[in-house]
Image (tube, rainbow, N blue to C red):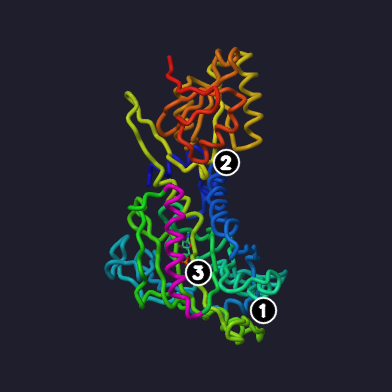
Amino acid sequence: MEKIVSLCRRRGFIFPSSEIYGGLSSCWDYGPLGVELKQNIKQAWWRAVVQERDDMVGLDTSILMHPQVWEASGHIKGFSDPLVECKSCHLRWRSDELEGDRCPSCDGELTEPRMFNLMFKTFMGPVEEATSVVYLRPETAQGIFVNFDNVLNTTRKRLPFGIAQIGKAFRNEITTGNFIFRTREFEQMEIEFFVKPETDKKWLDYWIEQRLNFYVNLGIKRENLRLRQHGAEELAHYARECYDINYLFPMGWAELEGIANRGDFDLVQHASSSGKSLTYFDEETKQQIVPYIIEPSAGVDRSFLAFLCDAYDEQPDNDETRVLLHLHPDLAPVKVAVLPLSRRENLVAFAKELYADLRQCWMVQYDDAQSIGRRYRRQDEIGTPFCVTIDFQSLEDNQVTIRDRDSMNQIRVPIAELRNTLQAKLEGEDLFVLPPGGMIWKEG
Ligand code: GAP
């Protein structure tokens, strides 16, 4: 984990929040490369679960919601963890995560556990009084449930169908840590998939498989993913059945995504609390039914950490170490780097023109500082799949080389073919499938 944290800082993926003031515990800022990677993860998810499906639509609901939402959802009553405090050093712990019954920091005696609600409270409007209390949402899901009827009426979707949302969630976690793994402000990617009650098992299995495939298709090694079923005693208050997709993080196996069968709990609760009907008219049986909900709920930040950990690699490089990120091209923050072999004026002008052209298609970096070897290493370290090198011969034959990050193999292609060739390679075509006029390139 130390290596990942250090890379994130060094290369501008993630910084401690409010660092010039000493930071704020468990809060992190995504830097120039981090914001690109995070954006790409969200885009890949949205593409897989909304854009490429005809049974899903998206939503973007507000973080602050009517306080009654949290009464009905059970969060005010039940969204709590057992908290204990050390009588000597006064550190606080989640008692269900402790191994013994003494303080892990100073071995002091602990208080009896008391339930601590994880929702952040704030006040709506200029008066701080009980009637103006609102909560920062602890999950994005509730924004979907309360819009079930709106979506049904405006999209005319029929069961089974789903609603997807990406957004911030907040939990006043008792213990945080492991970098961005557990924080108090984080982002979720949630699907609420509405099904006929008798088909819930089938759809739960279906979504487990879909979600495992999502991570594997984006490069996570299958052996680093595991499915874990929740025991009856650990099920959330709304869940009938739940599976975690666990990832082998540097600190051990831990939850990356949860996939739950929420049954009809949420729609029944909100219908009874709001007095509005949240049912669905089943054309087959000619009856009003309350759909069941299958919920695959993923964390953006945890996915970010999992993708980084899985992509991280070190290879011997003479006396040094070559650090590289084998990020899937869809996720890589920078897709292509443009590198003129030297800073000679005519070469730089040529390279900058190419850079301006390629930037219209992808995030591209231009770099002409230090040796070409060092520049390749800099790009490897941030996971750039391809480097385009412009040399003196390029000025004469209008050809450039493309270097592949993982194999370090190179091909040489006419500039007229460059955009299409890069596009094909970014989509997974083998490097040695050559465009017209292209050739395999051996340096020297
Ligand atoms: N709506 C269901 C729900 O929120 P959850 O298992 O509590 O379920 C879903 O959360 C996902 O959100 C988790 O699998 C994890 O990826 C992410 N998540 C939850 N709490 C988090 C935290 N404190 N920090 C970072 N990510 C978190």
Which amino acid lies under the numbered mark 1 shown in the image of this protein?
Thr
How many numbered circles does the render carry? Answer: 3
Q: Name the residue located 41 percent from the left edge and 77 percent from the top edge.
A: 114
What distance separates the C-alpha of mark 1 from that of mark 2?
Answer: 41 Å
For this view, does 150 lie left or right of residue 306?
Answer: right
Choose top left, top right, bottom left or bottom right for residue 243. bottom left
Which residue is at the front of the view, 290 or 189?
A: 290
Which amino acid lies under the numbered mark 3 shown in the image of this protein?
Glu
Disc 3 CB within 8 Å of nearest ligand 1 atom: yes
Q: Are marks 1 and 3 in contact (CB under 8 Å)?
A: no
Q: Secondary structure at mark 1?
A: helix
Q: Which residues are magenta?
A: 197-219
Estimate the x, y position of residue 293 in percent, counting from the top left.
Answer: 52, 74
For this view, does 334 lie left or right of residue 233?
Answer: right
Which amino acid lies under the numbered mark 2 shown in the image of this protein?
Pro
Along the polypeptide, which appears first: circle 1 or circle 3? 1
Label placed on residue 32 = 2
Q: Are marks 2 and 3 in contact (CB under 8 Å)?
A: no
360 w.r.t. 217: above or below: above
Residue 25 in view: no
Quarter of the figure with the C terminus: top left
- Camera-side mark, 1 or 2: 2
Q: Name the dominant secondary structure of the magenta segment.
A: helix
Q: Secondary structure at mark 3?
A: strand
Q: Which residue is mark 1?
A: 131
Q: Name the residue located 60 percent from the left edge and 70 percent from the top edge.
A: 144
Label placed on residue 295 = 3
